[in-house]
Image: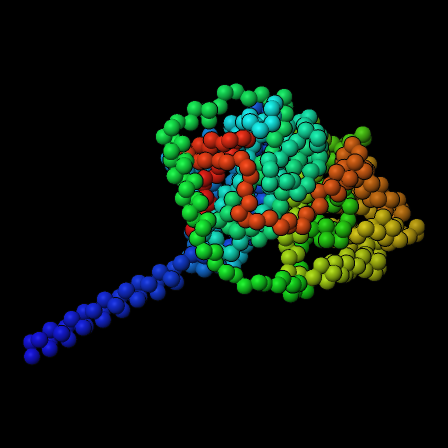
Amino acid sequence: MVSKNRALGLTVIFLGLFILHALITITSVEAAITYAVSQEWVRIWINEDGSIDILYNITLTYTSGSPEGIVTVGMPKGDFRIEYARDPSGANLEYEDVSNLDFYGVDVQLKKPIILNRPYTFLVYAVVSGMVFKDETISGNVGLQFYPTTFPGASGPVGNVRVGVTLPEGVTRNEVKHPTGIPFDNVFTEGDRLVVYWEESNWPAPQEFTVGVSFPEKYVSLGPGIWFYVSIGGAVLAAVVVIAVILMRFRKATYEKPRIGAEALSSARGLTAVEAAVVLDLKPVRVLTMILFGLILKRIVMIMDTDPLIKLQRLERPVDEPAPRLRYYEIEYLGALQPEGTLNEMKLARTYLELRDTVNLRLRGYSRADTINYYKSIVNNAWNQVTQAQTPELKGDAINQNIEWLLADDRFDENITIAFPPDVIMYPRPDWHWYWYGPHFPRAPPTTPTEAKPIPGQDFANNIVRGLEKAGNNMVKNVQDFTNRLILVQPVAARERSVRSRTSCICACANCACACACVSCACACAHGGAR
């Protein structure tokens, strides 16, 4: 009897332990955090002292669990300085240097609350010193190799990986080289500097996207680097790391069924007028002019001069007046504003390219044709409000309310003059900020509507058209050269490249200190992640 009771007791205990283990397992599964990375865009600027400026633009989506919203971004080496971490609206994000003996990187805290299945985009701008080394394969050359931080814990591949490297000023196309096996996808000029560019779609998240560039040493001034003094102990550790990596590569790859992508949805809704202008294929300078008008509407800037180039002035806001929310492209545009009020063409080009790439990303899965028709209908509806207004005052109000969408019309110049026939007399209102502080002659708005001076409708329309033309023509030194420069930077089709292909330059990482047989590696031994 005792034996039976004891056996029954043991059974109950084991059953309880089994249930407890099952509950713990289920809880762990339910609490597992999964995420996917849809884009990892990196821009690098090589400086004359051998350092680099690096800008990460990463978008990820948490798909399950209870994430903290902390993303780890690896850095190439320990000697880095974070300039900022921001979201697309320009709001600063908290970050923490989490580097240790064998890892260099930062944790970026995304804005809370963290919501599942919502994409989060953030930017990290850093300066890293001592990144350019002598190229032992090409006499008289220096260069660098680099791969962006990886995401071993991500679900599925990274949707789109892009790396652009801006060479020091003076490097020409025939002087820039790439290590064997890492050809450029594109080479173009940005301002007066050469840029080399790579792009891949559906790149394995744990896999290093390695790129490299080599150019004459005369364009940089390098001091003695610490990498020449890598110790024997570091080399031994490096060999161990290489062997471990090789063994990992021989693991059986997981088979993934082929998938077919299609435009499953109709039109992409929710774009701003500026973003819609990109979809509607307006000229780049016109799109940048729309951004400028938006900043004028928000009373962020005013135009002080238009000849020979536009000069802007930032406006001070009253202390008790909240600052308006800026779009990501408006922040980029303001970044091009130089102390004397002119605009940096290289940064303007970067503003347009980032805008275009963001819009193209948002259109994925949607029908571009339906999206174009949708935004054309919005523009047409805006014009209908203007043309159907019964009085000049109502026409003016319709223009004021819809000016951003009206500017997205490639026939704006023609339609604005049609909307205001010769017999219409206008009284521009004091609160039409875009009119009084735009790129045309009015500068002193009346203090009250009753003080507004009459102006013929045709003159009113012509003022707007001339202002638009001046803004576009005088924003850059040569509109055609600027446009041609941007046309060269078209998205390239992802090339077929084996994920096992490697450059002939063999790199060994020892505590993220890289010793290479040719051009220096920027070893982000730092593998990133999210939690």
Way the structure is coloured: rainbow
The reply to whether residue 330 is in sight is no
| On screen, residue 325 above or below 137 | below
The reply, left or right, for residue 381 in relation to residue 523 is right
Q: Residue furthest bottom?
A: 1
Residue depicted at x 52% and y 51%: 204
Q: Where is residue 157 in the image (x, y as percent from the top left)?
A: 53, 54
The reply, left or right, for residue 242 in relation to residue 424 is left
Q: In which quarter of the image is the N terminus?
A: bottom left
Please tell me which residue lies in front, 163 or 55.
163
Residue depicted at x 51% and y 28%: 129
Q: Where is residue 479 in the image (x, y as percent from the top left)?
A: 80, 37
Please tell me which residue lies in front, 387 or 265.
265
Residue depicted at x 66% and y 31%: 176
The reply to whether residue 155 is in sight is yes
The reply, left or right, for residue 453 in relation to residue 197 is right
Q: Which residue lies furthest to the right in this view?
A: 422
Q: Position of residue 52 (x, y in %)?
A: 56, 31
| On screen, residue 10 above or below 296 | below
Q: Which residue lies furthest to the left in this view?
A: 2
| On screen, residue 168 above or below 265 | above
| On screen, residue 278 above or below 255 | above
Q: Position of residue 223 (x, y in %)?
A: 52, 20
Residue depicted at x 84% and y 44%: 465
Residue 107 figure quarter: top left
- How many marks the image carries: the answer is 0
Please tell me which residue lies in front, 513 or 91.
513
Residue 332 figure quarter: top right
Please tell me which residue lies in front, 141 or 137.
137
